[in-house]
Image (cartoon, rainbow, N blue to C red):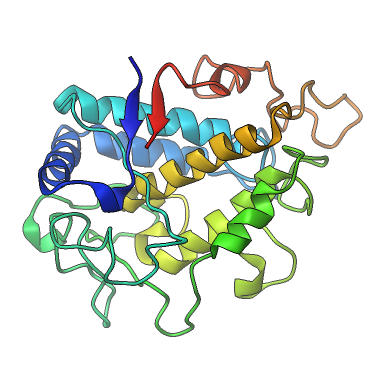
Amino acid sequence: MAYTRKDVSRLTAGERKRLVKAFLEVKRRGEYDEFVRTHIEYYTSDGEDGLRTAHMAPSFLPWHRRFLLDLERALRRVDSSVTVPYWDWTRDRTRTSVPWTKDLLGGNGRARDQQVMTGPFAYSAGHWTIKEGITDGAFLARDLGRARDPLQLPTRAELGWALDDPTYDVAPWDSTVTRGFRNKLEGWGTGSGSASWHNHNRVHRWVGGAMLGGASVNDPVFWFHHAFIDLQWERWKARHRGPRYLPAAPPGVADPQHDRIVARREKLPPWDVTPESLEDVSRIYRYG
């Protein structure tokens, strides 16, 4: 029977407590740091050589869907009542709204070094030491809203701009495309600075700290954010009724994207699954 992923703002006090406890136990077991390592390993940009699966590619959505499922299964091995909630950043938009509460993710980082000082994931609480990262910092860091150069979370209209596009993705299947639902949602834009970050990408920038770069998994909000991104894929499919993951077939040998992206029925590393197999998850979970 399919379970339900809830809006994080609708979790009860008991649900918050069980969710946090499951996260801390997965961390204690050493499993959580493996998720961080995996994301760092597959954080390949389209300026690098080789296959891209997690970012700047059509498989951005199915890759993170499977990644999220793996984490959720780890949490549910601890407590079968737990599911990953989603954070609707078009509605909960302030530094003090859910999920930035003391009984859930804790709040913003302090001014001098961005260290999170409140909540169960604060370094001072003793249960969340950063062991895998792109820096040597041991504490969870955040810079909600980016104090020195403020930016806003994406709006409902900006998210709608992505959902309105009836095509999943287009050639050359990378960060430069200006059409297609995938990149409008992933958020690689033209130009430079904050104007070039849309939707998914801008949320990472808004949270800041640990959420910047390949080790962004170190902040548990990563999963709440990606659950909301995953929900948008479901909403896009329901809205357009027919369009599917693209490309359907691999780019040809003469195409610069040959062997650089994953087609619909190709294996999606590091798993033995295809994007096609991840398009319908209705038997596993739904969104409430």
Is residue 11 placed above or below 286 in the rendered structure? Answer: below
Q: Residue furthest right?
A: 254
On screen, residue 80 versus residue 150, left or right, reads: left
Quadrant in which the N terminus is drawn: top left
- Residue 20 shows up from this direction: yes
- Of the pair 63 and 259, the residue shown nearer to us: 63
Say which quarter of the image contains residue 99. Answer: bottom left
Say which quarter of the image contains residue 59. Answer: top right
Q: Which residue is painted at 16% across and 36% down in the image?
A: 22
Is residue 113 placed above or below 276 in the rendered structure? Answer: below
Q: How many marks?
A: 0
On screen, residue 189 versus residue 107, left or right, reads: right
Is residue 286 placed above or below 197 in the rendered structure? Answer: above
Say which quarter of the image contains residue 247. Answer: top right
- Residue 220 shows up from this direction: no
Q: Which residue is painted at 54% across and 21% down in the image?
A: 280
Q: Residue furthest bottom?
A: 148
Is residue 15 placed above or below 78 in the rendered structure? Answer: below
Q: Which residue is painted at 29% across and 25% down in the image?
A: 73
Residue 164, position as x, y percentages in the image = 70, 49
Residue 2, position as x, y percentages in the image = 35, 19
Residue 85, position as x, y percentages in the image = 32, 42
Q: Which residue is painted at 55% across and 34% down in the image?
A: 234
Quadrant in which the C terminus is drawn: top left
Residue 4, position as x, y percentages in the image = 33, 30
